[in-house]
Image (cartoon, rainbow, N blue to C red):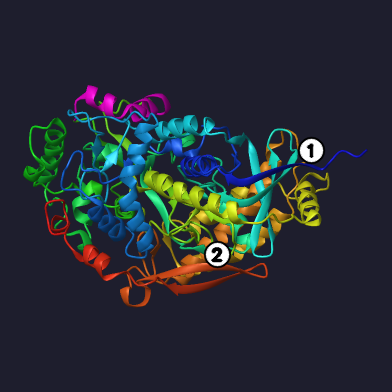
């Protein structure tokens, strides 16, 4: 008898991705009694979430009692330049504290205040110290906690298993095809609901903080299945990635360094960020070095409990402006000839007590010591912008996280659009994972409980297997590594931090050629232990994510948040405020649309328009 071409598994809910969003979704699905599987591209515990260092943003008010969900909501909307899903921003701000406290109940060990509360640190764009943290290893602690909770929740985990195709029956998802990365064996997962928690597509760029798994899988899977992609023009370039040595260029340097008082300087020794405070943030940030240094001292006093929150009057240092502003400022210094010889600037925390630095920033200390032979307690770090995060993603319903066009298909975390708008505030991603991972898992479980069983078309599965095996059929073809390299050059040079109409048009045209080359890739040697085969399949996803990003960036003729157009440098509120760019699949072709965001309720608009002190705990409700 012939050997089956693929193994078959049946579950109520299949979660694709085992980062914070995926694990939190799977835990919630299992708690609801649904038979749940987690499929992770890498090893369990190796998720990209572990690389999130600074903290998880939640308005608990443990360090500064003036904080509350309204201020957090306002900060998120303001940082996202008002193209966020206001409902997601509201849910996130309200539910984040409970999700952090829930993690603590499950065993997460956060840093503490002197009174024993969960410690919170300052971060860019946040009015008050808001990030619950574990040194600079917060993401690692979150994954450790969720992993431990998850394996005791009855989950079935399939490690080193990559999903390559979704299957539908009518307008609902009914399963997915995946393969084992070591053996190449295919698996069909039949499911009533699928949650995509696959992260972003940073590996399409030359300089990125992203791990190897980030190849846009979820975006492409959803788009191929008929779901919309939204806001794909908004790419966050984290202002501080490592610059040296070249082998680690782009690796993240946590914003926690600046939250603990790190200063950005150019080669002239100038603390340059004071020159780059935009009008939108005038009056909220320090105007002199003396005031900025006073703010740092007041944070120390707050944490020590030697002063009350009401006495902390100094304004935040401009190093803690939202990431898009800081990243553009660094690039401006470099292009003006005031950058380092290696194309970065300096980030200095060496003025603080060495023991404090080693205690609060242990990963940063060891990272620079071991990879660059730099002792950050003695000399500054050399840093520059690195592709870090995709604000856009799969379009979802704010309440349930289900895609409107494909029933039973959910998305959460970086794979989903909406919460962050044009620019994500640091720390919001970790509570995004928790809040909307839980919501995705809860509603996926509810959908699976009420959805009748539906068949998977065997012919479609066989056709998909044939397609993916064609990359190892032994015939001559393109080298997948060369195609990937060319793709990265296009995205880095023509769709990077600053975009222009001509370059974006060229990028889209070149992507069409790369798409054809990707389809013709060959990786001889069979499917077992063949990394070239993995790259060939990853390319099929990356080109879709890149095309959506470039087409969206070309359409949005303004600069806003993480999207900077060199030919439309101003923000055009009249034409673009309250509008999302959407990429649709129309018979296999990508078509673009601009849609209005639903009107924000008057009570939430009042919060957005208010000053922080007016909506603080002791201020106007």
Residue 139 image point, x, y percent: 40, 36
| Outermost residue toward the top in this view | 355
Q: Which mark is residue 526?
A: 1
Q: Residue at x 57, y 32 (%)?
A: 43
Q: Which residue is mark 2?
A: 228
Q: Position of residue 514 (x, y in %)?
A: 65, 58
Majority secondary structure of magenta residues: helix
Q: Residue at x 34, y 28 (%)?
A: 109
Residue 619, quarter of the rendered image: bottom left
Res. 566 in view: yes
Q: Residues within 10 Å of mark 1 (few under 14, many from 20)?
A: some
Inter-mark Cα distance, 2 to 1: 35 Å
**Nearer-the-camera pick, 396 or 205:** 396
Q: Earlier in the sequence, mark 2 or mark 1?
A: 2
From which residue to which does the magenta span run?
Answer: 352-372
Q: In the image as oriented, which residue stretches furthest toward the bottom?
A: 574
Is residue 162 depicted above or below 328 in this figure?
A: above
Q: Is residue 298 left or right of residue 423?
A: left
> Which label lies toward us, 2 or 1?
2
């Amino acid at each position: 008898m012939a050997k089956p071409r693929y193994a078959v598994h049946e579950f109520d809910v299949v979660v694709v991705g085992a980062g914070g969003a995926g694990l939190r979704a799977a835990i919630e699905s299992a708690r609801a009694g649904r038979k749940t599987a987690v499929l992770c591209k890498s090893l369990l515990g190796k998720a990209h979430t572990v690389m999130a260092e600074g903290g998880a943003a939640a308005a608990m008010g443990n360090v500064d009692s003036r904080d509350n969900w309204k201020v957090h909501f306002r900060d998120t909307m303001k940082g996202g330049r008002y193209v966020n899903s206001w409902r997601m921003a509201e849910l996130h701000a309200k539910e984040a504290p409970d999700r952090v406290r829930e993690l603590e109940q499950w065993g997460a060990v956060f840093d503490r205040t002197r009174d024993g509360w969960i410690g919170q640190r300052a971060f860019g764009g946040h009015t008050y110290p808001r990030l619950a943290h574990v040194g600079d290893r917060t993401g690692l602690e979150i994954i450790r906690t969720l992993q431990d909770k998850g394996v005791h929740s009855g989950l079935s985990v399939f490690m080193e298993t990559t999903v390559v195709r979704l299957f539908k029956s009518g307008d609902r998802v009914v399963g997915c095809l995946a393969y084992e990365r070591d053996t190449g064996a295919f698996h069909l997962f039949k499911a009533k609901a699928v949650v995509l928690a696959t992260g972003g597509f940073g590996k399409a760029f030359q300089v990125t903080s992203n791990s190897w798994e980030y190849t846009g899988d979820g975006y492409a899977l959803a788009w191929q299945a008929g779901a919309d992609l939204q806001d794909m023009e908004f790419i966050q370039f984290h202002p501080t990635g490592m610059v040296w040595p070249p082998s680690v260029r782009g690796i993240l340097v946590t914003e926690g360094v600046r939250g603990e008082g790190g200063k950005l300087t150019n080669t002239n020794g100038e603390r340059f960020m004071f020159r780059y405070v935009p009008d939108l943030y005038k009056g909220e940030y320090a105007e002199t070095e003396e005031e900025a240094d006073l703010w740092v001292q007041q944070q120390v006093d707050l944490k020590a409990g030697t002063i009350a929150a009401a006495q902390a009057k100094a304004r935040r240092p401009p190093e803690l402006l939202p990431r898009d502003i800081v990243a553009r400022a660094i690039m401006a210094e470099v292009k003006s000839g005031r950058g380092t010889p290696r194309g970065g600037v300096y980030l200095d925390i060496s003025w603080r007590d060495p023991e404090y630095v080693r205690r609060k920033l242990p990963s940063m200390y060891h990272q620079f010591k071991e990879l660059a032979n730099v002792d950050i307690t003695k000399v500054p770090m050399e840093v520059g912008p690195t592709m870090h995060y995709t604000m856009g993603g799969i379009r979802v319903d704010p309440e349930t996280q289900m895609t409107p066009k494909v029933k039973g298909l959910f998305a959460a975390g970086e794979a989903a659009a909406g919460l962050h708008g044009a620019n994500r505030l640091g720390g919001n991603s970790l509570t995004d994972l928790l809040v909307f991972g839980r919501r995705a898992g809860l509603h996926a479980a509810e959908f699976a409980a009420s959805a009748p069983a539906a068949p998977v078309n065997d012919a479609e599965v066989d056709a998909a297997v044939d397609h993916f095996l064609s990359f190892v059929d032994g015939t001559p073809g393109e080298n997948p590594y060369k195609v990937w390299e060319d793709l990265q050059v296009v995205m880095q040079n023509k769709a990077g931090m600053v975009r222009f109409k001509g370059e974006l048009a060229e990028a889209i045209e070149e992507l069409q050629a790369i798409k054809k080359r990707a389809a013709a890739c060959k990786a001889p040697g069979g499917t077992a232990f063949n990394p070239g085969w993995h790259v060939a399949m990853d390319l099929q996803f990356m080109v879709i994510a890149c095309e959506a990003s470039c087409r969206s960036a070309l359409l949005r003729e303004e600069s806003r948040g993480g999207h900077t157009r060199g030919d439309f440098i101003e923000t055009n509120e009249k034409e673009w405020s309250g509008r999302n760019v959407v990429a649709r699949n129309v018979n296999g072709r990508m078509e673009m649309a601009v849609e209005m965001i639903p009107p924000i309720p008057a009570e939430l608009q009042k919060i957005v328009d208010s000053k922080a002190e007016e909506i603080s705990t002791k201020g106007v409700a």
